[in-house]
Image (cartoon, rainbow, N blue to C red):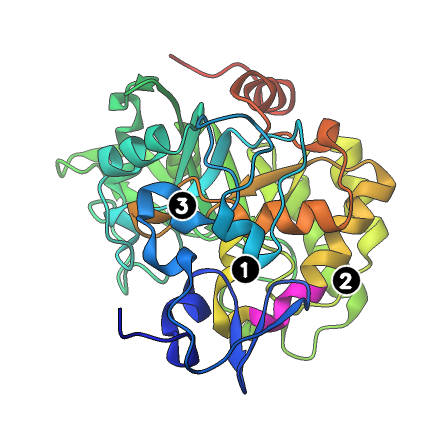
């Protein structure tokens, strides 16, 4: 194979290794010298089905075993730790994602996931014009099977936080017409419509324009108000945004309400987000110290990334994160959290 590590774009985008002057920097700052004459390492050459040779392929072999390529890169899996739920991924509906619902489910099954939460974007980034026809996707989530290809399937969305008061997209948008053109008896709220059939909601910040010049206290209050929403279960990728907030106050409120802080694979692996690693590590470490439970999300925008948690495993190992605080360790645990916080899920 002609390709060399010296120009390996794949690793920079897939697992967060940043190539600089013949040194590979792994998540967490571990370094490995690489000669330009070296052939591409085993992790590049193995198939995607084997997780590119990184970490433990869920459901394959003995839990805790490390693939040779993973060992060469210094990645280890904690014996006994498991992540069997991916609670954050996207389908074609999100518009900048590339796979169907079934493709995501099949990918989750191939990765040994017991549960998949599909959480398409619910945000102004999807449509310039907000009409009920554009958002009818959320009117028919009942059609999804609860189990598909052996995977338990949950219905959700990733909703944008839109202001410093902690409001979520659609709170101020109302429809007078049904999708068929008939009139509602009274204007119907977009947020209420979208959340009605969701088992849970991930609340995230994407567009940060409204946070410009905001104080630490304002950002803290924003997250506290978001946690008050009865359908919000998870604060999404809080380490990626770069927003400053009182960590102990927000994490304490999440713990008190039984809600979760997301550890997001995409925030750790993408080269353009390399700067978020330290903040993610700080948040995860404090969750461990305060006893705050976490969820795992691949944030996959294509099926081949669903269920992959190699970078998250490495981070959790690094901070010795307790398994009992991993709410996504198995399907029963995560469903129990959903139902204890939000209520029983409809069949």
Q: Distance between the residues labelled 1 and 3?
A: 18 Å
Q: Are marks 1 and 3 in contact (CB under 8 Å)?
A: no
Q: In this view, does 216 lie above or below 82?
A: below
Which quadrant is home to the C terminus? top left
How many marks on residues? 3
Question: Cα distance, mark 2 to mark 1?
Answer: 18 Å
Whether residue 254 is visible: yes
Tell me the residue at 82%/59% (across/down): 246
Tell me which segment is drawn in magenta. Answer: 274-278
Q: In the rendered structure, which disc, 2 or 1, sits on the residue that comes first in sequence?
A: 2
Q: Mark 2 points at which residue?
A: 245
Give the labeled residue for mark 1.
267
Dot 3 or dot 2: first in sequence order is 3
- 275 inside magenta stretch: yes
Q: Is residue 45 highlighted in magenta?
A: no
Q: Residues within 10 Å of mark 3 (few under 14, many from 20)?
A: many
Q: In this view, does 39 lie above or below 161?
A: below
x and y percentages locating residue 8 in the rendered image:
39, 74
Task: Choose mark 2 or mark 1, whichever is in front.
Answer: 1
Marks 3, 2: nearer the viewer: 3
Instruction: Compare residues 25 and 151 and report the one nearer the observer.
Output: 25
N-terminal of the pair, mark 1 or mark 3, is 3
Q: Is the magenta stretch mostly helix, strand or loop?
A: helix
Question: Within 10 Å of the Cα at label 2, are there few (<14), some (14-19), or many (20+) other Cα atoms?
Answer: some
Left or right for 82, reference 140: right
**Residue located 55% across and 56% down the image:** 72
Q: Which residue is drawn at 24% across and 37% down?
A: 103
Give the SS element for disc 3. helix
Disc number for residue 51: 3
- Between residue 130 and residue 58, name the one nearer to us: 58
């Amino acid at each position: 194979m002609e390709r060399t590590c010296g120009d390996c774009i794949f690793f920079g985008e897939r697992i967060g290794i940043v190539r600089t002057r013949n040194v590979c920097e792994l998540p967490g700052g571990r370094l490995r010298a690489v000669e330009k004459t070296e052939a591409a390492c085993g992790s590049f050459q193995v198939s995607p089905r084997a997780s590119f040779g990184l970490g433990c392929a869920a459901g394959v072999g003995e839990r805790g075993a490390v693939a040779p390529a993973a060992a060469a890169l210094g990645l280890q899996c904690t014996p006994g730790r498991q992540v069997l739920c991916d609670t954050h991924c996207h389908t074609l509906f999100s518009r900048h994602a590339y796979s169907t619902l079934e493709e995501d489910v099949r990918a989750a099954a191939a990765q040994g996931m017991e549960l998949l939460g599909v959480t398409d974007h619910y945000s102004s980034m999807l449509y310039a014009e907000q009409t009920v026809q554009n958002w009818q996707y959320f009117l028919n989530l009942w059609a999804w099977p609860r189990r598909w290809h052996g995977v338990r399937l949950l219905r959700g969305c990733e909703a944008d936080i839109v202001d410093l008061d902690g409001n979520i997209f659609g709170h101020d948008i109302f429809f007078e017409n049904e999708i068929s053109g008939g009139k509602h008896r009274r204007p119907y709220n977009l947020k209420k419509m979208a959340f009605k059939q969701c088992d849970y909601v991930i609340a995230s910040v994407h567009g940060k324009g409204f946070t410009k010049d905001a104080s630490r206290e304002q950002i803290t209050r924003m997250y506290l108000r978001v946690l008050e929403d009865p359908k919000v279960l998870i604060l999404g990728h809080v380490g990626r945004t770069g927003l400053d907030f009182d960590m102990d106050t927000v994490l304490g409120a999440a713990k008190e309400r039984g809600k979760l802080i997301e550890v997001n694979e995409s925030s750790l692996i993408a080269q353009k987000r390399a700067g978020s690693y330290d903040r993610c590590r700080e948040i995860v470490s404090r969750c461990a110290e305060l006893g705050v439970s976490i969820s795992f999300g691949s944030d996959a925008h294509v099926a081949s990334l669903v269920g992959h948690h190699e970078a998250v495993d490495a981070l959790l190992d690094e901070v010795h994160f307790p398994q009992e605080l991993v709410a996504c360790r198995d399907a029963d645990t995560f469903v129990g959290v959903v139902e204890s916080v939000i209520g029983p899920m409809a069949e």
